[in-house]
Amino acid sequence: MPAAIDIKNLYKQYPVPLKREAVNAVDNLTIKIEEGEIFGFLGANGAGKTTTIKILLGLIYPTQGEASVLGKPAGDIETKHKIAYLPESPYFYEHMTAAEVVTFYAQLFGLKREDAKKRAEELVDFVGLGSKSDRNKRISEFSKGMRQRVGIAQSLINNPTLLFYDEPTSGLDAIARRDIRDLMLQLKEQGKTMFLSSHQLEDVEKVCHRVSVIHKGKLRTIGLVDELLAGERVDITVSGATPSFNERLKTLAPEANVLGGAGTFNVKDDAGLVAQIIDTARAENTRIISIIPKRRTLEDLFVNIVGGRLTDEGSIEGAPDVNRVSANKYKELN
Ligand SMILES: Nc1ncnc2c1ncn2[C@@H]1O[C@H](COP(=O)(O)OP(=O)(O)OP(=O)(O)O)[C@@H](O)[C@H]1O
Ligand SMILES: [Mg+2]
């Protein structure tokens, strides 16, 4: 089976108007995504996320490199009915209701009016806009979160296997974000493949199987969420620690310290060391309450890679975000 998405040495440069310079929006990107994967594509403002998605959809051409989607070159007409795109700021006709918008798009997909209406009803319900009051509202009366739900409903009309979602939770409040996240989790359960661009590290951590971080067009890291976030230390909590346990603990892990008879200490995540501590506790009549590997957050990872904190809007505090290359390099690639 071909990969759902296969990107090989992809480059995209945009010229800077009136200057002999170019922006390296995508810079030698190579990524493979399998079917059924929920893939998080992280990066600050201007990192190159939307540019990559547009290339994969065939909306723009790369400067160099290859990209295939569902086994065909990006933009191939045959794959269009199997993929869907939710843009950063979806636009809908303001005077329509959610069901009317979705019916309209379903008809564009070739469904007959009655079938389109039926499909729209199902999808409007699925995204949580099925209540009587929401049904009667026009898009102009919708909040940002409700609009995103319409976008998700519209993206599902053709029952696509591969979804491109560009910042589906940006600018939403905590409740709307959680609702959209839950919808994405349902799509994950249905076995969809999703290419999810986001600045919302918490959402990505909860939804994605694998994540990547791009910075100034370059891939900086890629891996399974669990592997990337696996910590290097474990927290061990004990009670009834005897003085002799404390003595022996000091020789095993000099930095560990239990003040009084109970508490939590932190040691290196080394299976041998943890086993020795467990044996020591047993021998010294000390009770182990819990052993918890300390997970890093995606935020920690991001800070390490990019060297700055990512804000909810996607900017990196204190970091410049221009990806400019000289005229010579630009000519070389064109
Ligand atoms: N049409 C364009 N013409 C010229 N430069 C562009 C164009 N579109 C994007 N760029 C530049 O390419 C770089 C990557 O932009 P892109 O929109 O892909 O970033 P992004 O990761 O989606 O950012 P954001 O999080 O803000 O949506 C930026 O430096 C941007 O200014
Ligand atoms: Mg973008």
Image (spheres, rainbow, N blue to C red):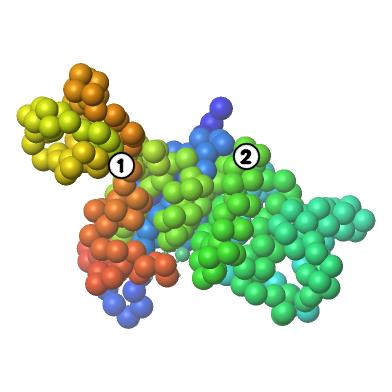
Q: Position of residue 253 (x, y in %)?
A: 12, 33
Question: Dot 2 lies on which element?
Answer: helix
**Residue 13 visible:** no
Which one is closest to the eye, mark 1 or mark 2?
A: 1
Along the line of sight, the residue nearer the viewer: 330 or 283:
283
Q: Where, quadrant-wise, is the C terminus in this rendering?
A: bottom left
Q: Position of residue 69 (x, y in %)?
A: 55, 43
In the displayed structure, 10 sits above or below 48; it is above
The amino acid marked with disc number 2 is: Glu
In the rendered structure, find residue 189 and report the number of the disc placed on it: 2
Does any atom of ligand 1 lie closer than 8 Å to the CB of label 1?
no
The amino acid marked with disc number 1 is: Lys
**Sequence order check: which comes first, mark 1 or mark 2?**
2
As measured in the structure, the alpha-carbon distance from the residue carrying label 1 to the one carrying label 2 is 27 Å
Left or right: 3 as drawn, with respect to 99: left
The residue tagged 1 is 294
Residue at image location 70% in from the left, 52% down from the top: 156
Left or right: 198 as drawn, with respect to 182: left
Q: Residues within 10 Å of mark 1 (few under 14, many from 20)?
A: some
Left or right: 267 as drawn, with respect to 114: left
Q: Position of residue 203 (x, y in %)?
A: 48, 54
In the rendered structure, find residue 161 and report the number of the disc placed on it: none
Q: Position of residue 142 (x, y in %)?
A: 69, 75
Q: Where, quadrant-wise, is the N terminus in this rendering?
A: top right
